[in-house]
C-alpha cells in the first residue's frame, strides 16, 4: 500500500532566500558590529572629553590650592611683620629687598619703598631676628619714586657712632663688602672691653636713634700711633643672606627736636 508523502515544494523564492541567507547574516552582523563600533567610538570620545575636563579641573584646583597656600604664607608673614613693628617706638615702614642677586660682596641693595612712601635720604634701615632683636643694617643713600638704595654699615663709606656696654664711645667705619666687618676707633685705652661685647648706636647722630644693636666685638688691637685709644674689630649682626625683617625708620634727630619744641 503506497501512502501519499507530501514533499516540500521547492520554489525559486525559497531557493533565492536560502542563497541570500548567508549574505543577510553577514550584513546583519556587520551592521551590528559597525553600530557597536560607532557607539564605542562615541563613548570613547565622550570619555576622553570628560577626562580632559577632569584634568582641567584638577589643574585649576591645584592652581587655586597653590594660590591659597601662598596667600596663607603672605598673611602669616604680614602678621609677623605687624607684631614686630609694634615693638619699634619710632615711625617704621616695612620693606623688602628687590634685587635677588644680593651676595656677600654687596655694599648696597635696592628696596621696594620710595618717595611715594615718605622715604628720604639718610633714613636709617634696621633689621630684626628673634635671636638678636633689632639691629642696624644701613641707611638710605638714594631715593626714587618706588624704590630706594640702601648702603650697608660695612661699606667703606659708612661711619656710625657706637657705644660699649660700659658707656665708652667710639666711631665705627666699614671695611668693605669682602670683609663684612667694621673697625671701631677712638675707644679710650682705659675702657674695659671683652670679646663678645655688644656695640649699640650711641645716639650722637642725626640719622640713628640710640640703643640699636650694631654688632659685637671679635678682636682688638692697640698701636703706638694710637697711644690713647683702642682699635676694636666689630662683626655686624646684619648678614645679606639672612635678612628676615626689614624696616625703614622715618626719623631724624632734627625732626624729633622740632617736635619736642612744639
Image (cartoon, helix red, strand yellow):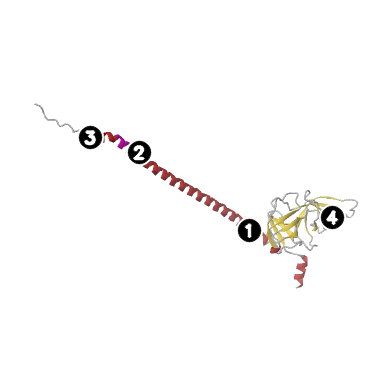
Say if the magenta span includes residue 253.
no
Residue 97 horizontal/vertical position (percent): 69, 55
Give SS at disc 1.
Answer: helix
State the residue at coordinates (53%, 49%).
59
Callout in the foreground (2, 4):
2
5 versus 181 height, above or below: above
Query: Does label 4 or label 3 sit earlier along the sequence?
Result: 3
What residue sits right under mark 1 in the picture? 78
Q: Is residue 44 above or below residue 15?
A: below
Of circles 4 and 3, which is in front? 3
Q: Is residue 30 left or right of residue 7?
A: right
Q: Are marks 2 and 4 in contact (CB under 8 Å)?
A: no
Query: Where is residue 142 drawn, in percent x and y?
Result: 75, 59
Residue located 57% across and 54% down the image: 67
Mark 2 or mark 4: name the one nearer the start of the chain: 2
Front of the two marks 2 and 3? 3
Q: Which residues are magenta?
A: 22-32
Instruction: Tell me the distance, in whole angstroms, between the alpha carbons under discs 2 and 3.
Output: 27 Å
Using a 10 Å C-alpha cutoff, classify the residue at mark 4 as few (fewer than 14 neighbours), some (14 to 19) or many (20 or more): some
The residues tagged by marks 4 and 1 sit, at their Cα atoms, a distance apart of 40 Å
Judged from this view, the residue extending furthest toward the left is 1
> Which residue bears the numbered disc 4?
185
The residue beneath circle 2 is: 30
Residue under the point 53% across and 52% down: 60
Amino acid at each position: 500500500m503506497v501512502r501519499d508523502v507530501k514533499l516540500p515544494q521547492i520554489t525559486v523564492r525559497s531557493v533565492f532566500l536560502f542563497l541570500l541567507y548567508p549574505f543577510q547574516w553577514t550584513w546583519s552582523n556587520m551592521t551590528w558590529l559597525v553600530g557597536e563600533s560607532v557607539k564605542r567610538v562615541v563613548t570613547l570620545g565622550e570619555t576622553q572629553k570628560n577626562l580632559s575636563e577632569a584634568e582641567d579641573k584638577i589643574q585649576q584646583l591645584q592652581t587655586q590650592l597653590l594660590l591659597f597656600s601662598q596667600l596663607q604664607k603672605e598673611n602669616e608673614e604680614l602678621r609677623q611683620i605687624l607684631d614686630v613693628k609694634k615693638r619699634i617706638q619710632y615711625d617704621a615702614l616695612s620693606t623688602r629687598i628687590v634685587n635677588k642677586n644680593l651676595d656677600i660682596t654687596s655694599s648696597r641693595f635696592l628696596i621696594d619703598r620710595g618717595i611715594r612712601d615718605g622715604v628720604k635720604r639718610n633714613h636709617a634701615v634696621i633689621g630684626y631676628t628673634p635671636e638678636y632683636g633689632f639691629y642696624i643694617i644701613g641707611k638710605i643713600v638714594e631715593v626714587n619714586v618706588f624704590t630706594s638704595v640702601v648702603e650697608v654699615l660695612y661699606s667703606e663709606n659708612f661711619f656710625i657712632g657706637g657705644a660699649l656696654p660700659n658707656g665708652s664711645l667710639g666711631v665705627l667705619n666699614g671695611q668693605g663688602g669682602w670683609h663684612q666687618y667694621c673697625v671701631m676707633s677712638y675707644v679710650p685705652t682705659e675702657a674695659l672691653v671683652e670679646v663678645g661685647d655688644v656695640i649699640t648706636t650711641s645716639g650722637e647722630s642725626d640719622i640713628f636713634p640710640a640703643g640699636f644693636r650694631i654688632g659685637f666685638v671679635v678682636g682688638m688691637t692697640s698701636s703706638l700711633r694710637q697711644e690713647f685709644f683702642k682699635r676694636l674689630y666689630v662683626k655686624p649682626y646684619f648678614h645679606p643672606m639672612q635678612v628676615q625683617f626689614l624696616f625703614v625708620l622715618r626719623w631724624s634727630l632734627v625732626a624729633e627736636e622740632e617736635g619736642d619744641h612744639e
